[in-house]
Image (tube, coloured by chain):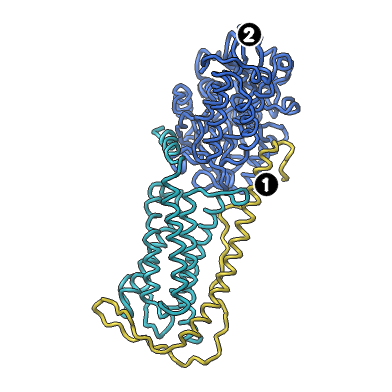
Chain colours: A blue, B yellow, C cyan
């Protein structure tokens, strides 16, 4: 089999690929076990949920403490508002994800699989439910489906585990981590659905598809999910999405916890997590947002900061009050025009907030703001007052 | 397998180090308190021997129950030497749940 | 084994239990306030609370065992589990039995929290607020040393610490500006039917 791609097979508009078709196209689920961990580690696969963490290392550390009682939590929450890839994968290729989940369970010694799917992502949930019903009984009985609340932080690993254990999806950073004691106190492997889809192909062909999924958003003609090779540049991806609707000024890579890049530098960047890391960037959850030149960058940033501040879980002062203060300062500059005290405040608070919250949320928001201040420094310094245009 | 720190960004790394420092502090405090508790057991056992070696204690504020509270008479043969502070309780330093 | 040593040990262990239990209650109260600093992360408060609670049970076990094994107390093993079944200071010792069983329930449910769910765990854990004062009263009522020169001040300090922590929580809690948004968030992320 040559390098299979994630979205190979029936056309996406025709809906989910059923079990029979899946097996016919790709063959049955390969036997796996702890030996699969070496294959995964050797492949260099990194997580596609946003953290880009080496998957083999993760599996190895869970397998080491599992003792046969581990849990695999399939993270299909997709809390990032503009991201669509996880939903698409669940709707169109549910069996790739289930394959990956059962392969992971076999490799790390897990007795339970939890499918964590966004409560508002109805077609994704239906598709996964139907796909699960088509699986053999010995696989089906390991699985339960849990609805992820539709909040930004509900998609984090600790929130997912906390929801399953305690009925509330609050993120934590207290030890033990989910890897040590997660669902029902057992070592829990939390893995994004796209990562597991990669595993499903890797286990069959011994190679990765060499592609990944990104969501093109903002000022492109055809926003949506693309499967791109690692040698694809952002410029080429924009072209695949029908080109920009109008000239762009910048690109936001990685969603709301990502970084802003000026358009001239962005278009030649390769959509490859390792290549981006060399520039201090991260592909994150794979959202690539184009900001048209006609939009006001400061207002966009202020709107996103207001959203992120509102998504705080209100467990810690630095996050809840700190992000709100930053969002307010941003909004004031946006609506009333630049003032030096707000600019100073933002720079100071942005330096103070990270690392003091209970979870990663304020850190991500602050990194977003800092990249905005860097890329749009002139705009922030010279912003005229105008009413809110973009929420 | 050693953690590949180059792959994690610095923020994650500093958070992990802070967490490890916190866990070390927790373990040290737990052990310290456990040892102090054992020492306190010895001291208070000795103090109770010294302060009340075994005279008959009449129940001062007698219980309101109907059954008569019998006088508690220990052996009263306690010598004046303070008992050895051998602790019979094993301090269990239980970690808070992770390595 | 020297029988009076058993008697001294039960009193010593009872005192240590009182101190450890009071410290654990204080930490439990502070946990709810989410106090933390750069060197003292929040999980340190809850972790220490947990460890001290287990230590309390160990010394409480020693206290009970030495009391029952001591031939001069005429306490059978039953008195450790059935309240008000002893002849000696029936009421005050019975309080001790009750406190012991409440603590067992609190610790057992905490260890089994994954199985019983958050709601049940919370309700049972509030029994800790009953176990502690009952334990204190037991110490004052049963204890040979209740109003002695060493035990009484010790009790006063322990009670003072718990009352201070409680007072602080009542004041700081009502001034907690995060209480409302935190409740809003938790309401928004409750588990619903899958």
**Chain of the residue on which disc 2 is drawn:** A
Residue A2 versus residue A117: which sits nearer the camera?
A117
Residue A382 or residue A301, whichever sits in front: A382
Tag 1, which chain? Answer: B
Examine the rendered structure and indicate whether residue C35 appears above or below residue A213. below
Residue drawn at (55%, 90%) of the image: B81
x%, y% of residue A297? 61, 17
Q: Mark 2 and mark 1 in contact? Answer it, CB < 8 Å.
A: no
Query: Dot 1 corresponds to which residue?
Result: B17
Q: Describe the element under mark 2 as helix, strand or loop.
A: loop
Q: Quadrant of residue B31?
A: bottom right
Locate residue A74, reporting x and y percent.
54, 33
In the depicted structure, whether residue C182 falls above or below residue C137: above
Residue A183, position as x, y percentages in the image: 51, 43
Whether residue A285 is visible here, answered yes or no, is yes
Q: Residue at x 49, y 79 (%)?
A: C9
Secondary structure under the numbered disc 1 in the rendered image: helix
Q: Residue at x 47, y 87 (%)?
A: B53
Task: Characterize the local packing of mark 1: few (<14), some (14-19) or many (20 or more) Cα atoms within 10 angstroms.
Answer: few
Question: Would you identify the image quadrant in which residue A335 lies?
Answer: top right
Where is mark 2, residue-wise? A244
Q: Answer above or below: position of A72 versus B27.
A: above
Question: From this viewpoint, is residue A195 visible?
Answer: no
Quick one: label 2, few (<14), some, or many (20+) residues within 10 Å? some
Residue at far left of view: B66
Give the CA separation, mark 2 to mark 1.
44 Å
Camera-side residue: A227 or B18?
B18
Q: Position of residue A279 (x, y in %)?
A: 75, 26
Which residue is drawn at the image coordinates 68% and 41% (left, top)?
Answer: B13
Q: Look at the image and tell me in which quarter the N terminus of chain B lies.
A: top right
């Amino acid at each position: 089999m040559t390098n299979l791609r994630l979205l190979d097979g029936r056309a996406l508009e025709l809906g989910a690929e059923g079990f029979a078709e899946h097996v016919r196209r790709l063959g049955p689920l390969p036997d796996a076990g702890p030996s699969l961990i070496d294959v995964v580690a050797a492949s260099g696969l990194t997580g596609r949920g946003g953290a880009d963490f080496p998957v083999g290392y993760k599996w190895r550390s869970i397998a080491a403490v599992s003792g046969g009682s581990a849990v695999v939590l399939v993270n299909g929450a997709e809390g990032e508002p503009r991201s669509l890839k996880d939903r698409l994968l669940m709707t169109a290729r549910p069996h790739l994800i289930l394959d990956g989940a059962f392969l992971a369970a076999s490799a790390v010694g897990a007795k339970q699989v939890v499918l964590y799917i966004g409560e508002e992502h109805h077609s994704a949930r239906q598709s996964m439910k139907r796909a699960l019903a088509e699986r053999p009984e010995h696989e089906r009985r390991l699985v339960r489906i849990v609805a992820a609340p539709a909040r930004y932080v509900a998609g984090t690993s600790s929130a997912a585990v906390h929801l399953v254990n305690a009925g509330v999806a609050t993120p934590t950073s207290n030890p033990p981590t989910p890897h040590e004691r997660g669902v029902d106190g057992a070592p829990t492997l939390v893995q994004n659905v796209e990562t597991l889809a990669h595993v499903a192909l890797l286990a069959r062909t011994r190679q990765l598809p060499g592609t990944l999924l990104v969501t093109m958003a903002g000022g492109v003609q055809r926003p949506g999910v693309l499967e791109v090779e690692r040698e694809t540049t952002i410029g080429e991806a924009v072209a695949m999405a029908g080109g920009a609707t109008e000239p762009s000024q910048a690109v936001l890579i990685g969603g709301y916890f990502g970084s802003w890049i000026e358009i001239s530098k962005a278009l030649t960047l390769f959509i490859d997590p390792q290549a981006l890391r060399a520039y201090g960037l991260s592909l994150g959850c794979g959202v690539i947002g184009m900001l048209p030149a006609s939009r006001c960058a400061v207002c966009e940033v202020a709107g996103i900061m207001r959203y992120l501040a509102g998504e705080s879980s209100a467990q810690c002062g630095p996050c809840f009050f700190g992000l709100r203060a930053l969002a307010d300062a941003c909004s004031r500059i946006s609506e009333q025009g630049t003032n030096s005290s707000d600019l100073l405040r933002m720079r100071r608070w942005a330096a103070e907030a990270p690392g003091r919250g209970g979870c990663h949320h304020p850190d991500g928001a602050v990194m977003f703001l800092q990249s905005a201040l860097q890329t749009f420094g002139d705009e922030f310094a010279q912003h005229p007052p105008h009413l809110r245009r973009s929420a | 397998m050693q953690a590949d720190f180059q792959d994690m960004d610095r923020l994650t790394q500093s958070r992990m180090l802070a967490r490890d420092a916190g866990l070390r502090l927790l373990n040290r405090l737990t052990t310290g308190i456990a040892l102090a508790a054992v020492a306190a057991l010895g001291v208070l056992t000795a103090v109770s021997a010294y302060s009340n070696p075994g005279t008959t204690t009449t129940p001062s504020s007698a219980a309101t129950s109907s059954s008569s509270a019998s006088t508690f008479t220990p052996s009263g043969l306690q010598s004046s030497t303070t008992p050895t502070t051998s602790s019979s309780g094993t301090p269990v330093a239980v970690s808070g749940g992770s390595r | 084994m020297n029988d009076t040593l058993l008697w001294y040990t039960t009193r010593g262990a009872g005192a240590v239990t009182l101190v450890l239990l009071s410290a654990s209650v204080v930490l439990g109260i502070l946990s709810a306030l989410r106090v933390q600093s750069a060197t003292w992360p929040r999980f340190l408060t809850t972790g220490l609370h947990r460890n001290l609670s287990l230590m309390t049970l160990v010394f409480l076990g020693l206290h009970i065992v030495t009391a029952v094994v001591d031939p001069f107390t005429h306490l059978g093993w039953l008195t450790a589990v059935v309240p008000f079944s002893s002849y000696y200071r029936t009421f005050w010792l019975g309080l001790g039995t009750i406190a012991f069983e409440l603590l067992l329930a609190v610790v057992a449910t905490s260890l089994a929290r994954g199985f019983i769910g958050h709601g049940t765990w919370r309700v049972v854990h509030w029994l800790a607020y009953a176990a502690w004062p009952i334990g204190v009263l037991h110490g004052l009522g049963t204890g040979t040393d209740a109003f002695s020169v060493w035990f009484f001040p010790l009790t006063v300090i322990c009670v003072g610490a718990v009352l201070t922590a409680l007072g602080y929580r009542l004041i700081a809690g009502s001034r907690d500006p995060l209480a409302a948004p935190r409740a809003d968030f938790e309401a928004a992320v409750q588990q619903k039917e899958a």
